Image (tube, helix red, strand yellow):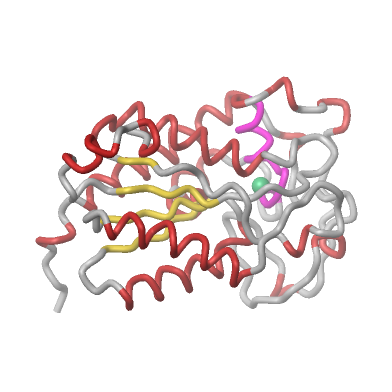
Amino acid sequence: MFWDQLSSKQIQALDKNIPVLLNIAAVEQHGAHLPVATDRMIGEYFSGLLNKELEDKVLILPIAAIGCSDHHMGFSGTLSLSHNTFAALVKDIIQSVLHHGFYNIILLNSHGGNQGIMQVIVEQLGFANPNAHIVGATWWTIAKEELLKITETGFGGTGHACEFETSLMKVIAPQLIHDDLIQMGANVSAFPQSDGDMLFGSKVSFYRTMKEMTPNGVFGNPVQSSAEKGILIGKAVIKALKQLVLDMYHLSDRQYIK
Ligand SMILES: [Zn+2]
């Protein structure tokens, strides 16, 4: 169900153990071939599929479309919130949800630049609301095992406007893709410990702007993208998200591991 399509009275009548999902995304450059809405559209695609699968077992909030994209500001079209503004926005939305009695919360992240602050938000909301269950899930992390079976590009192939994101967009909005402008990411290595991608995280955190990482704005290999792969990625992510939502129903009676 979508939160904003229900009436206040309908929301009030809901069982409050239903997991409430907020997609946090980004509006930022995605190379020359993808629209700046890519992360938002991918998040909405997953939310829509999840809604079809679970119907009244999940409640989906209006998307937080703009995220933390300061590192992309060297490219036109990027919109960015500071970490403080973004954290305040997300926490205020979730506090409103908690105020109405819900306590199972999932932040579904579809943007790499939101990962650090999402962890902080989970910790702050969790500390402030000891009776709530706050989960942060990034789509390529939660489905990592399945996604490793789908990727064909090896280390450095998935990252940004890459094999995965371009494959998904070939399913979601092929009319917005500039096929003639698809090109390999200009992946620039800083030093080995800082190299990584969506599936193989780096050993250390190291700040670089996207312009420094990739002058063409692409990180990874969109040349090997396909709509078929996009369908498989969607299925893998939805399988993992569905399990997460269903597992949240049992968090209150969880057994502690000794
Ligand atoms: Zn993206």
* Residue plotted at (22% across, 46% down): 18
Q: Is residue 21 magenta?
A: no
- Judged left or right of residue 114, residue 54 is left
* Image position, residue 164 (x, y; %): 63, 40
Q: Quadrant of the C terminus?
A: bottom left
Range of residues picked out in magenta = 157-170
- Judged left or right of residue 256, residue 141 is right
* Image position, residue 210 (x, y; %): 80, 60
* Residue plotted at (33% across, 72% down): 126
- Judged left or right of residue 102, residue 239 is right
Q: Is residue 57 above or below residue 197?
A: above
* Image position, residue 20 (x, y; %): 32, 48
- Judged left or right of residue 136, residue 68 is right
Where, by quadrant of the figure, is residue 239 drawn?
Answer: top left
Q: Quadrant of the N terminus?
A: top left
* Image position, residue 154 (x, y; %): 66, 49
* Residue plotted at (55% across, 63% down): 115
* Residue plotted at (32% across, 32% down): 6
Where, by quadrant of the figure, is residue 168 drawn?
Answer: top right
Q: Is residue 162 magenta?
A: yes
Q: Nearer the viewer, residue 5 or 149?
A: 5
